[in-house]
Amino acid sequence: MNKILKLLVSTRLYLLTTLGILLYLAISQLHLSLWYVLLGGIVLGVIFGKVFCRWVCPMGLVMEIMMSLSPDGKVRQMYQYHKVGCPIAWISGYLNKFSLFRIRLKEDSCLTCGKCDKQCYIVAMEPQKYSLYKPGLTEPGSSYTCSKCLQCVAVCPNGSLKYKL
Ligand code: SF4
Ligand code: SF4
């Protein structure tokens, strides 16, 4: 299971590019109703949390390309603001707390190496507030902003962090 997840995470940008372009074509050429897109985003949100933005969305793809060109983080913050205006991001971000699949920490096996936090853009933006493993800090995986890139889970050396039912 973990191998599949690592493979998915390592190919996420290719998946996002393919799905984003297909969805854009379906909307622009086949006139797919945005209501169906919204419904699809919500169904995905109920099952997986806010995966739509970083795995499927054409606008998410554009923002991700822009983010990669801006290491100073300004565009990262713009990305957050963009998502606040999107109903799919808003609803599925809220569903991060209730989705069937969630990021879970097995505290007794955690090495406190901090590798997970180094992968997470939410922790990078608000290190005093969020951590995936430090006691007392809210796990970013349940935050509205977590877009389920799952890099934190993929980088955990001993499987203490899992994305599971
Ligand atoms: S999946 Fe993990 S690394 Fe990605 S945003 Fe959510 S908490 Fe951060
Ligand atoms: S990467 Fe894994 S072992 Fe290291 S701090 Fe995070 S949860 Fe713990």
Image (spheres, rainbow, N blue to C red):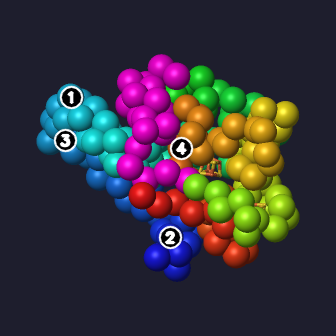
Residue 113 located left or right of residue 145: right
Task: Point out residue 81 in the picture as x, y percentages from the top left corner.
Answer: 59, 23
User: What amino acid is at disc 4?
Assistant: Ser
Of the residues tagged 2 and 1, which is closer to the observer?
A: 2
Q: Earlier in the sequence, mark 3 or mark 1?
A: 3
User: What amino acid is at disc 1?
Assistant: Trp
> Residue 117 lies in magenta, yes or no?
no
Tag 4 secondary structure: loop
Question: What label does residue 29 carry, if any?
Answer: 3
User: What amino acid is at disc 2?
Assistant: Leu
Looking at the image, can residue 131 be seen? yes
Instruction: Give the distance between the C-alpha atoms of the residues marked 2 and 4, in whole angstroms.
Output: 15 Å
Q: Earlier in the sequence, mark 1 or mark 4?
A: 1
Residue named by callout 1:
35
Residue 80 located left or right of residue 138: left
> Residue 85 lies in magenta, yes or no?
yes
Label 4 CB sits under 8 Å from any ligand 1 atom = yes
Q: Which residues are magenta?
A: 84-103
Tag 3 secondary structure: loop
Residue 24 located left or right of residue 51: left
Mark 1 in CB contact with mark 4 (< 8 angstroms): no
Instruction: Give the distance between the C-alpha atoms of the residues marked 2 and 1, in whole angstroms.
Output: 30 Å
**Residue in the picture at 61% in, 29% down:** 80
Instruction: Give the distance between the C-alpha atoms of the residues marked 2 and 3, in whole angstroms.
Output: 33 Å
Residue named by callout 2:
5
